[in-house]
Image (tube, helix red, strand yellow):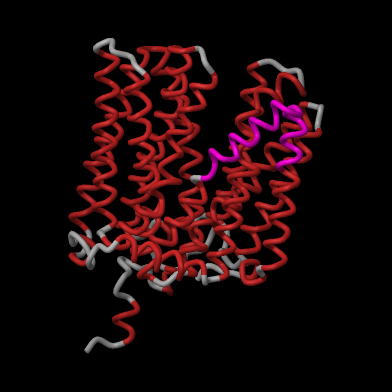
């Protein structure tokens, strides 16, 4: 019979010894990246995040060029997020039943096929929304599945004491990939149009597939097996949801995620109206305003990655979400560009606190056998974003963008304050 110590380490790979702490500014990032297995997962994530942003920029630009319709451009986002809503929990159940690295390999293989179809379609001159939207949906399925599988795999291989810093590093990498990938996508679109941009997208997915194949060979046999247990999806989903929602921390993260994605984040689709109608600035400064929250997100992720990790992460999570809602009311009421720009940076700092701790809090609070299903629950909450987009669109048509943003932010602020008040376990939660 195996002893307790052996069981405790059964789902960890390459943990860094406790006495291997390093001092100095780069000590913690060095510890986070000390595992060769995690380093490969981290680099595969950078490839995948880059591909995601290349597709977002390319598809939006191409649909606008083909149709000239902002509504049809908006539908690209709808089809991209829809899989989170309808399939997020399913993918979470699959990630608890099947080997996570195999799921990541499948995601890259399906995404590579979709990218090749898009590139070939434009090379042959067969541009059609009937091809673009289904392929965006397929790529969105990859994003929904990746959310549960990648975070759960990271939790398998990383030292639990470094989980908070690891997830912050993932958030930092995602923000960095967004900045570089959008620049590259814009250059490729100007140099060669859709065939070149989608061809590069296919190249990224192919590189990720090869990289993950090499990673799989390095994993111990228990992480490379084909599946773990029987696949009874309905009962598995129900038991995973029920057990997760009984945990106050997971329940709190679930409700905060719904509020943020339905009432706060949708303001971003009205940022052009805020810039033009409220702040009276042109497209260049509109772009600066739209990207300012990314600066705040990078600052937050860098601070969390380099920090000591000895914080109440639950308080940072819910405090960041609440701060973002309060700041958004200020953004809606501001008529001074410099003030609005500063508020956008501050919103990015707050949403960075929310994003960096979202998955880590769930992983820390959930039993190992149902972690991916709990993340699937959070993916479903994220998938409610289109509901918020429809809501803010209808409100802005009825009462104007300024009132719509302020009203939804105020409603979100009330909801978040209630969660903070009624869920002290979330406020006190630490990632262990």
Front-most of 322 and 285? 322
Q: Report x, y in % for residue 202.
A: 28, 29
Which residue is drawn at the image coordinates 23% and 52% (left, top)? 102
Name the quadrant of the N terminus. bottom left
Please indicate whether residue 322 sits to the left or right of residue 261 in the image: right
Residue at position x 46%, y 19% from top? 61
Task: Give 156 or 25, whichever is nearer the viewer.
Answer: 156
Is any part of residue 27 visible from this angle? no
Horizontal and vertical percent position of residue 174: 47, 42
Residue 295 in which image quadrant: top right
Q: Quadrant of residue 427?
A: bottom right
Determine if residue 160 is in view.
Answer: yes
At horizontal 31% and vertical 17% (from top left) the residue drawn is 195
Write the start and end of the magenta stretch as one range.
384-408
Q: Main secondary structure of the magenta part?
A: helix
Q: Nearer the viewer, residue 292 or 98?
A: 98
In the visual, does 354 lie left or right of 185? right
Question: Above or below — where is 195 with respect to 419?
Answer: above
């Amino acid at each position: 019979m195996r002893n307790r110590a052996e069981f405790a380490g059964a789902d960890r790979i390459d943990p860094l010894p406790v006495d291997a702490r390093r001092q100095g500014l780069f000590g913690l990032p060095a510890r986070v990246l000390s595992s060769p297995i995690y380093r490969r997962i981290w680099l595969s994530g950078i490839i995948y995040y880059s591909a995601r942003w290349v597709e977002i920029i390319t598809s939006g630009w191409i649909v606008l060029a083909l149709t000239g319709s902002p509504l049809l451009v908006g539908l690209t986002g709808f089809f991209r997020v829809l899989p989170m809503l309808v399939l997020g929990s399913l993918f979470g159940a699959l990630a608890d039943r099947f080997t996570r690295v195999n799921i990541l390999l499948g995601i890259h293989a399906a995404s590579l096929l979709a990218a090749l179809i898009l590139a070939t379609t434009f090379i042959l001159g067969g541009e059609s929304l009937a091809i673009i939207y289904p392929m965006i949906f397929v790529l969105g399925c990859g994003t929904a599945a990746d959310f549960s599988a990648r975070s759960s795999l990271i939790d398998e291989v990383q030292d639990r004491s470094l989980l908070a810093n690891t997830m912050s590093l993932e958030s930092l990498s995602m923000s960095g990939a967004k900045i570089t990938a959008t620049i590259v996508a814009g250059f490729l679109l100007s140099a060669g149009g859709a065939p070149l941009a989608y061809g590069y997208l296919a190249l990224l997915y192919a590189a990720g597939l090869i990289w993950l194949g090499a990673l799989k060979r390095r994993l111990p046999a228990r992480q490379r097996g084909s599946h773990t247990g029987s696949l009874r999806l309905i009962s598995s989903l129900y038991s995973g949801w029920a057990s997760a929602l009984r945990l106050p921390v997971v329940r709190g993260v679930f409700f905060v995620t719904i509020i943020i994605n339905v009432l706060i984040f949708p303001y971003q689709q009205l940022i052009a109206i805020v810039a033009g109608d409220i702040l009276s600035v042109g497209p260049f400064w509109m772009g600066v305003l739209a990207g300012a929250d990314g600066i705040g997100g990078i600052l937050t992720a860098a601070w969390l990655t380099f920090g000591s990790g000895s914080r109440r992460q639950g308080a940072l999570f819910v405090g960041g979400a609440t701060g973002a809602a309060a700041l958004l009311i200020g953004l809606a009421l501001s008529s001074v560009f410099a003030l609005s720009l500063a508020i956008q940076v501050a919103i990015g700092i707050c949403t960075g606190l929310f994003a960096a701790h979202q998955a880590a809090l769930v992983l820390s609070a959930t039993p190992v056998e149902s972690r991916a299903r709990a993340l699937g629950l959070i993916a479903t909450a994220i998938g409610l974003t289109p509901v918020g987009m429809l809501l803010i669109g209808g409100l802005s048509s009825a009462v104007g963008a300024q009132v719509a943003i302020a009203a939804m932010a105020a409603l979100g602020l009330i909801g978040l304050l209630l969660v903070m008040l009624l869920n002290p376990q979330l406020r006190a939660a630490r990632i262990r």
